[in-house]
Every structure is written in C-alpha cells, then in structure tokens.
Image (spheres, rainbow, N blue to C red):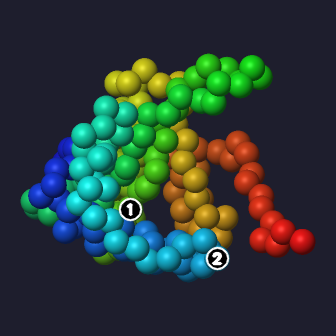
C-alpha cells in the first residue's frame, strides 16, 4: 500500500468514499447533513490549491482511503498564539479495508504533510456518537481540546 497525492483520475473512488462519509454525517447528525455530490470543480480547487491536498491510500492500483488536509493559520486574535494547523477536513477508509492500519497510515501522512509545511499542530473533528472514530483518533495521539455546543432553537 502506498500513499500519494490524489489526481483527477482518482475521482470515481473518491466520490464513493465521500458518499460513505456523507452517509455517516446523515446518520450522526441528520439536522445538519444531507447526501451531496462533489463535482469536478470541488476536487480541482483542492488540487490547484497551495494550502490543501487530498492524500490517497492505494492498494493494487485501487484507492481504498483518503485524507483531505488543509493548512490553516489560527485566527488573528490577541489572546491566541500565532500558530498554523494542518486540519484534517475528511478522512475515510473503504469499509472492507478498515481495521487494517490504513487510517493510521493516512493520519501519519497528514502529520508528515504538516511537518513539511511547518505547522504547529494537527486538528480534526469527530461526531460525539462515533465511539469507534473517537477511539481511533485517541490511539493516533489526538485528545479533546474543545467542545462545540449548539442550540437548535432560536427562541
């Protein structure tokens, strides 16, 4: 298995993986998520960017997982240190390939991507009901730093 930057030829596999992610989103937070379609321009904008990439895990010439990484400077607020983060926007491994270390290798690739770009730390988000996902990230060195809370009613 290798990890490399994605190309336009990877789009059919990436679209299937994004569909799996969106199905998880709908399952965990139907109030916020729907099944969508990522068009070619969505991917082309990432591939053309100097601050983001999609890294794919490839086995036997087949994309079996990916991580979408973004380099983001922290907000310029006087109380925040001027730091830069590699943000893992999305990570997905094909269901039949899970629990084989591929996700861990993708996280490692995201961390290496951050090192190459001189970032200070790595961040992502996970649904609070995704117990397996939380365990996965904790095994890969992540810990809870902030809780996002919201109110669905504006009464």
Q: Nearer the viewer, mark 2 or mark 1?
A: 2
Which is nearer the N-term, disc 2 or disc 1? 2
Asked whether residue 14 is in view, the answer is: yes
Binning the other alpha carbons within 10 Å of mark 1 as few (below 14), some (14 to 19) or many (20 upward) gives: many
Name the residue that disc number 1 marks: 92
Looking at the picture, how far across and down is residue 30, in whole percent?
A: 60, 79
Q: Residue furthest front?
A: 155
Question: Which element is circle 2 on?
Answer: loop
Which quarter shows the C terminus?
A: bottom right
User: Residue at (12%, 58%) from the top-left corner?
Assistant: 9
Q: Is residue 52 left or right of residue 23?
A: left
- Tell me the quarter of the picture where residue 114 sits: top left
Looking at the picture, how far across and down is residue 104, in whole percent?
A: 40, 50
User: Residue at (45%, 72%) from the top-left corner?
Assistant: 22
Looking at the picture, how far across and down is residue 32, in whole percent?
A: 60, 71
User: Residue at (24%, 50%) from the top-left corner?
Assistant: 44
Residue 103 got which mark? none
Asked whether residue 64 is in view, the answer is: no
User: Residue at (65%, 45%) from the top-left corner?
Assistant: 143
Along the viewing direction, whichever of 134 and 20 lies nearer the viewer: 20
Counting every numbered tag in the picture gives 2
Q: Answer whether labels 2 and 1 touch (C-beta < 8 Å).
A: no
Q: Is residue 66 left or right of residue 31?
A: left
- Tell me the quarter of the picture where residue 80 sits: top right
Q: Is residue 79 left or right of residue 155?
A: left
Question: Which element is circle 1 on?
Answer: strand
Binning the other alpha carbons within 10 Å of mark 2 as few (below 14), some (14 to 19) or many (20 upward) gives: few
Along the viewing direction, whichever of 112 and 31 lies nearer the viewer: 31
Q: CA distance from mark 2 to mark 1?
A: 21 Å
Name the residue that disc number 2 marks: 31
**In the image, is residue 152 above or below residue 141?**
below
């Amino acid at each position: 298995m290798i990890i490399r930057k994605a190309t336009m030829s990877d789009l059919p596999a990436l679209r299937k993986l994004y569909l799996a992610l969106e199905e998880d989103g709908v399952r965990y937070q139907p109030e916020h998520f729907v099944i969508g379609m990522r068009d070619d321009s969505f991917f082309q904008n990432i591939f053309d960017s100097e601050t983001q990439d999609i890294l794919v895990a490839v086995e036997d010439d087949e994309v079996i997982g990916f991580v979408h990484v973004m380099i983001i400077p922290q907000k310029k607020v006087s109380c925040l240190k001027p730091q830069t983060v590699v943000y893992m926007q999305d990570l997905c491994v094909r269901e039949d390939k899970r629990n084989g270390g591929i996700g861990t290798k993708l996280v490692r690739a995201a961390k290496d991507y951050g090192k190459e770009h001189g970032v200070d730390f790595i961040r992502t988000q996970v649904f609070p009901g995704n117990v397996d996902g939380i365990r996965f990230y904790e095994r890969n060195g992540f810990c809870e730093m902030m809780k996002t809370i919201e109110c669905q009613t504006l009464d």
